[in-house]
Amino acid sequence: MAHTDEPSETTRSAGQSTGDASLPWLALAEDYELARAREDSLDRLVEWPAQRDLLGDVAGRSVLDLGCGNGAKLAELVEAGARDCVGVDISGNFVSVTPPGMELIQGDLSELDAVPALTGRKFDRITFLQSIGYAKDPVSTLQAARAMLADDGFILLTRTHPIRYAVERAEKNGTSLGEEYYSTASYTYFHDNWNDRIALTKQAYTVSDLINLFSAAGLWIEQAIEPQLSEDARRRYPHKQAVLNKYLGILIFKLRPLPAR
């Protein structure tokens, strides 16, 4: 998986049948990384700075990045002093050079028990940066991650704001925002910013769905934020501010295990 804004989904090239939830990232990994590297990408301008701020001082901390993409973000954390770090991504499309103190592993975040390098490990920070939606069973995946948290550790998880998808569907279907926000029907679209030849089929979700997911996995929300562009970035990239004005952006959650009863 990777740092994407896609929930649990399947993917297909035009005219082809859909597959399982891992296929979107396998098909889009390289295209996503190219889009993320652009000067005006919202990941660069909004998402990563906010994620980095919530992670805090990582010096001497171990980090597990589940759905790490090419591993570039994890490498930045290692360069900032993080140690004994591991990134897992199903694509295996990793950066060619990594700093000492990190390992990148091709693996499925839906099957963390099948990743030998994680057996018996504990981490101070575990991240799901736009990747939990690819898990076949998000509750089980979060439970597995929770079991790998060190004492006083936390999970950082980001998701695209569900209003974005409701707005897109309402425009496409000629319906209302409320109808689409609460719809449970799946829908398919092409991601123009990544690769407009690959269709993504999504299952809608609401904010309450996310809260209930965390609760079912034995986690509580210590902090939640909805990051926006800085004043300087708004002036420099008005077209990106227009996107956020319409689609709201992302949600970032800092999650900790519920106390044992």
Image (cartoon, grey):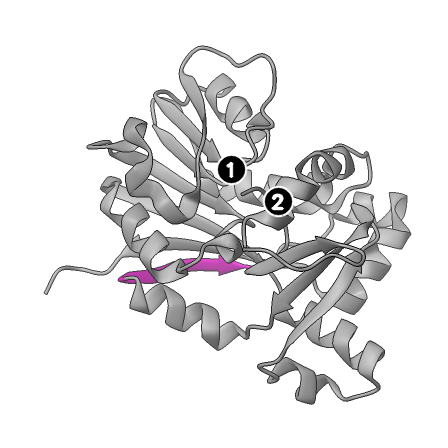
Disc 2: which residue: 25
Among all residues in the image, which is located at the extreme front?
Answer: 16
Tell me if residue 205 can be seen: yes
The image position of residue 251, as x and y in percent, is: 57, 59
The image position of residue 148, as x and y in percent, is: 26, 41
In magenta stretch: residue 220: yes
Secondary structure that dominates the magenta span: strand
For the residue carrying disc 1, how many other residues have a C-alpha within 10 Å: few (<14), some (14-19), or many (20+)?
many
Q: Quadrant of the N terminus?
A: top right
Q: Which residues are magenta?
A: 218-226
Tell me if residue 58 can be seen: no
Q: Is residue 37 above or below residue 10?
A: above
Is residue 52 left or right of 219 when viewed as pictured? right
Residue 90's tag is: 1
- Determine the CA span between mark 2 and mark 1: 8 Å
In magenta stretch: residue 240: no
Query: Which quadrant of the figure has residue 191?
Result: bottom right
Q: Quadrant of the C terminus?
A: bottom left
Q: Is residue 237 above or below residue 90?
A: below
Is residue 119 left or right of 40 when viewed as pictured? left
Indicate the secondary structure of the residue bearing disc 2: helix
